[in-house]
Structures are given as structure tokens and as C-alpha cells.
Image (tube, coloured by chain):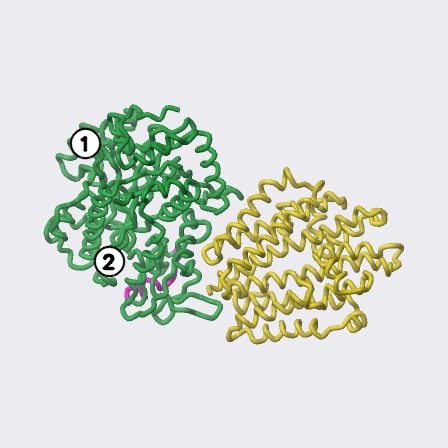
Chain colours: A yellow, B green
Amino acid sequence: MLSRTADHVYWLGRYAERAENLARTLDVQYRLSLLPHEARADGLGWKQMLITLGFEDAYLERHETLEPHKVVDFVAFDRDNPSSILSCLRSARENAHAVRGSISSEMWETFNATWLEARATAPSRFTARNVAEFIDWVKYRAHLARGVVLGSMLRDEGYNFMQIGTFLERADGVARLLQIRLACEATSVDGEPVAHDYYPWTVLLRALSAFEIFRRVSRNSVTPLRVVEFATFRTDVPRSIYRSAELIYENLRAVANTQSSETERRAGQLHAALRFGTLEAMTAGGVDRFLNHVLGNTADLSDRIGRDFLGHTAAG
Amino acid sequence: MDRAKPATAAYDEMYTAGGEVRRHYGVYSDWLLRQPDDALRQKRTEADSLFHRVGITFAVYGEQEGNERLIPFDIVPRILSADEWRKLAAGLRQRVKALNAFISDIYHDHEILKAGLIAPEQIFCNPQYRPEMQGMDVPGGIYAHIAGIDIVRAGEGEFYVLEDNLRVPSGVSYMLEDRKMMMRLFPELFSLNRVAPVEHYPDRLLENLASVAPAGVADPVVVVLTPGAHNSAYFEHAFLAQQMGVELVEGQDLIVRSGFVYMRTTRGPQRVDVIYRRIDDDFLDPLVFRTDSVLGVPGLMSAYRAGRVTVANAIGTGIADDKSIYPHVPDLIRFFLGETPLLNNVPTRVLRRRDDLAYTLDHLDELVVKEVHGSGGYGMLVGPTASEAEREDFRLRILASPEKYIAQPTLALSTCPTFVEQGVAPRHIDLRPYVLSGRDITIVPGGLTRVALRAGSLVVNSSQGGGTKDTWVLED
């Protein structure tokens, strides 16, 4: 497969997943902001979300104060923010456009239609006021796109690179989502950690489409550490970090070439760390540190894949 | 809504001068009369939204975000009878065969010049002549592998060739998408009429390209070379690559190494045997042509000259679709094939000839005068609609260098019923069939019908308010 084509499908996977992850992250924060005690926390959750997503500086360049509706607007709809949901949908569509001859027509039409509808409706139908509706729509379009990819895309290297992009992005997104919640937790009320804050963690589980799964497979009540363990180490939860690492490794092995053995080894290492990791070991070294390690690994893999396969010369 | 034969001087595809429906339009016309305007209008809206979603668009430069527009699609098909098509196809086959023979002669033995039928300066002083091609053999002696021949009907319905497009003719994707759209919007029409299929064009194109691969290559790798996603015809490039199942490459994806052309893949370089290029000659190889081109492939020409890759269409075909050569095409058919031309040329006056010059200067208000190297309506005088001052200005330009101009009568292009704001009304149309030449000559029945959507307009170009129609060739 052409390196340029592989590059575009990789980024198509990444941007599509990023849009969905952002929608899910926003979903958590939005729902929590409706709770009385979060309102008391003086926008802390919003601030933490911006920090963990790496959006804080860009936001402050555009807005002087931290106001929830402005944050929502910045994360969801701001076209000048290259990482907003809307911008991600546009980037996904542009990458699909660049390789529309190499992906299925149904895929192209789906990503194109998503962008056309977002562009047409975001300023009118969807606003910061009814962001929940927008989030549902983004998730719905993501489900649709996933189905189209599964049901129509040739299982060749293009599919592998798209999967790699998707799951690198998902591992990254889920790790950040956990970090946001943990950071709020650690400082929420007078700097005292709240050990059994049930509600925020069920919201997080719901945002990962995993609340019902948690109920089914874990007979225990919802606690922060159980949720972290669940979202990190389980192989049967579609959005867990481990599941993503497994798929990254699997797809990377399918495309291996003569110069990619080190990249493959590192993907295997990440996979093993999650495969054999335990909550005890994770808490002993610090949960945040562990998640940072995951983020460092995904960034490193992305650089290396760019060099090994996609024709990038410099890192990044 | 009055759908009777309109008062127009031009030949109408659907109605006779007496207002009768032509026989091959009979079934369609009956159907059309039963359709309420609202239903048709709704179908047209549906077509627009489908085209948008599918992204059948052309790029418009300098516009943000919405920088892709639709080419308007008309829901009334243009219909040709089996008999009309047979005659047209035979004429096209003959014409393209002669044009290929001519290009081969120009780049080899110059028999046509020795016979005195064309003046040497018409060839060697023409920027479309590529000296790099002189003496080089190409597989099968074929240069114009894909030709788009623009056909109009005038007078009593005779066909005329308006222009031969032998470089990178475009539009075939619209032919295919228009058919798909018609079948989706009006499936019942296809059970009422026996419409010859066109969907196999990409297969034929791939076969045709593979048939001209360098000698000895068993399973040739074919690619489509595009200038990129910002090119106005990008949709078509991607579409054809996808339909043929071959890679769509940009210049940066190709490299020339030890005399062969390779593409950069995730598993290292892979040999390329046939390049269906949608980039003009000038941009193909910065080492030989325009040095500032970033779209091309350095070294491509040397691999091509060594016979290690086939470029389709060949480099230098522009010499045969130039307006200064056009008047000679009937002679070329007689000279190279020994046959009588089956298709008419538009009667053309060549102003390098004294009597043609004199006649033209006397009849400027009736004629269309074209610059021989111009294209797309530039450097053109439309006598009947031009002002006195414009005609005088052109007269001076002609006198300064008459050899740069040709003149033709203003043709009343045929009309076809078209669904416009006011309902169904006649609009002027042309036709571009696509002729594939390789081991054999193949023509998919029909082609692309372009329609001038403004009342009375003769300009069918998409950049100037033209649209397209599905083109039906009825089977016997």
C-alpha cells in the first residue's frame, strides 16, 4: 500500500476516534457539572478537563475567564480550535477525501455526510445549550462509521493502519479521561480525597459505554479504583486500555516490515504491561504515573509508526 | 405546464419540427407526461443531496470549507437511437484511428509532411509538438489511449465533430454517476426502455491500459497519477482508480530508480508499469519539461523513452488536437486509412489561406473566430453577439497574424428538453463520447451529455453554468 495512503487512513482512524473520545469526555464533565457539589467546586472539573486534554493555553488565548458554556463551545464547536470535535470531524473527512479511492464508497460517504451535517447544524441546531444532544449525535455517527468500516472495508494494510490509528487514539483518550477524574478526586473537597464518590465514577463508566458491563461482570459496588482497574486492565471491555493495546499490537504485527521490529517490540511491551499489570502494582507506583507511562508509550509508537511506514522523516 | 414543442430554430432531440415526438423518445415522452412537476422537482432535490453526500463535486479554488460544488445534474435523459449510435460509433472509431496514425507519423517518418498535406511549420513551430518524443516507439503505436471527442448536432440533426480531446479528457465519471443516479431516481424507466449499459467502462479502461504495458510485463501494475486532492477533477481521478482497483498516486509517491518507475509503499518500493496520468505534459517531469513542477516525477521521461513504463495518454498528443490541425482531420483519415470520413468536421476556414482570410474579414458578424492554440473559450470572437468594437479589435488581431486563427459558422446546437425552474424546456446540448484505444478500440455506448442550463445559451462548460445529463443509447 502507498505510504501516503496508509498515512491518511491512519489519521482518519485517529481523528474519528478523537472526535468520539472528546464527545465522551465532554459528556462526563457536562453531566457532573449538573450536580450540586460539582457546581460548588467552582469549575474545577472544567479546568481539569482543559488541562488534561492539553487545551488550557489555547483556551486562555481566546477566552479570559473559565466559563462552562465557553469551554463547551471551545471543545465541541470552535472551528479555530484544531482539536475541537468539529475540527476532528473535518480532519477525518479530509483524510478520507484524500484516499477516497482506496477506502470503500460507503466509508467515504459516511465520513463526508457526518462532516456536512456537523457543518450545517453545529451553529444552529447544536449549541452549548444542548450539547448533550450533540454528544449523542457524535456518538451515533461514530457507531455508524465503525459499522461501515467493519462491514465494507477490505481487510488489507489500510484496515490495519486505520485500526492502529483508532486504538492508539482510544488508549490515549481513555487514559486522559481517567486522569481528569482522578485529578478532580484528589483535590475536590478541601484537598481531601473522597474515597467513595459513587456518582462521578458511574458517569465515567457510562461515558465508556461500560456501566452495564461493570454491573454484569463485577458484583462489587462502584469505587474509583475498581473503575480504574476495569477501564485499564480488562480484555473484554471494548474501550479498556488493555483492549486497545492488544489491537495495536495485533495490527502492527500484521503490517510488519524490515525496519519495524523495534516498534513492534515496544508495542508488545505496552501490551505486556497491561496484560500482566495488576491494580496493586499500579497503585504502588502511582496510578497517575502509570497512566502517564501509557500516554508516553502511545506518543512514542505514533512517531515510530510514522517513520517506519508512513514516510515521515522527522519525529511527529 | 406546457410541454409541447417550443419555438426554436435548432434541431430538437425529442421533437420533430412539426411537434411530433421522435420515435425513440416515444416511451420516455409518455412517461414524462404522466409525471407531475412537483414530483420531478422533488427528484431533482433528492439528486442534489445525494450528489453532495457522495461527494461528486468539483473543487473551486479560493473558497473556504465549501470549496466543492456540484455540477448540476438534469433529470431528463438525452436519448440516441441504436441506429444513430451505430453511425456515430463507426465515425469515432475511424477518426481516432486516423489521429493515432497521424501522431505516430509526426514522431517518426513525417509522411504527411512529405505528401505536402500539412506545412512543417504547423508541426515544428507548435508548442504542443514534443521533440523528446521524436523517433521513440510506444507500445502498439498508440498515443491517444483515451480520447474524448466533442460532438454536436446541428442543421437537420447531422453530427459534427467540434473538437478532439487527446490530452487528458475528463468527465467520464459524470457519465457513470449520472447513470447511477438515474437508475436510483427512476428505476421504472429502465424497465420501460432498453438502455445500453455503461457501467463496464472502468473494466474496459483497465484492460485497455494493461494492453499497452511495456513488452514482456506479464501482470502490469497500473496506477492513476493525479495532481492531488485540490485539483478540480480530483473526484474523477479517485473514482477511476477506485473503480479499476488500482492505486491513485501523486508525483511525490513515485520515484525513478535505475531506470524504472517505483511507488513508495509501506513495504518499500514497488514497480509501476503503466501510468494513467491526469497531469499535463508540462508538469510530468521537471528534468525535461517545466522545472518548477512539483506535481511530476523527476526522471520519468528517461524511463519512458527507455520503454520501461507506459504513459497514457502518451506525451505529445496535443499536436493532434490543436485547432490548427483540426481542419485537416478529414484529410488525415483519407491519407492514413484510405477511407471516406464518416463524421463531419464543422466547415472551417483556415486564415493562413488568402481566400479564407478574405471571406472571414467580410463575414465577421456571422462567424466564430478561434485562436488555434487557445482553449476554453479564450481568444475567441463570437461574431453575431460581439459588439462592433470587439469585431474591429479582432479584425486587427487577425490581420497582424492570420495564421493564428480559424473561423467557423455559428452552429445552432441541438436542444433537448431539460428540467429548469420553469419546468421542462429546451436547452442546448453537446456530447462527449470516450474512445479507448489499445489492442482494440472500445467505445462505451453514449458518453457525457453537457447542457447549457441558461435559456438560449450555447455554453455547456461546467465553469459557466453548464450541467450534465444521463445519455441513453437504446438497444434494438
Q: Quadrant of residue B429?
A: top left
Residue marked by disc 1: B360
Q: Position of residue A10 (x, y in %)?
A: 55, 61
Tell whether A57 sits left or right of B316. right
Q: Amino acid at mark 1?
A: Thr
Q: Residues under labels 1 and 2: Cα distance? A: 41 Å
> Where is the C terminus of chain B found, in terms of image quarters?
top left
Q: Position of residue A49 (x, y in %)?
A: 74, 53
Residue B393 is at least partly visible in this image: no
Is residue B294 inside the magenta stretch?
A: yes
- The segment highlighted magenta reads B292-306
Q: Secondary structure at mark 1?
A: helix
Chain under disc 1: B
Residue marked by disc 2: B440
Sequence order check, earlier mark of 1 and 2: 1
Chain under disc 2: B
1 and 2 marks in contact (CB < 8 Å): no
Q: Amino acid at mark 2?
A: Asp
At label 2, counting other C-alpha atoms closer than 10 Å, the crowd grade (few under 14, some 14-19, many 20 or more) is few
A291 and A304: which is toward the camera = A291
Asked if badges 1 and 2 are on one and the same chain, I answer yes
Q: Quadrant of residue A220?
A: bottom right
At label 1, counting other C-alpha atoms closer than 10 Å, the crowd grade (few under 14, some 14-19, many 20 or more) is many
Q: Is the stretch drawn in magenta largely helix, strand or loop? A: loop
Q: Residue at x 53, y 63 (%)?
A: A159
Instruction: Reply above or below: A94 against B27.
Output: below
Q: Nearer the viewer, mark 1 or mark 2?
A: 2
Q: Residue at x 51, y 73 (%)?
A: A257
Q: Position of residue A106 (x, y in %)?
A: 50, 53
Q: Secondary structure at mark 2?
A: loop
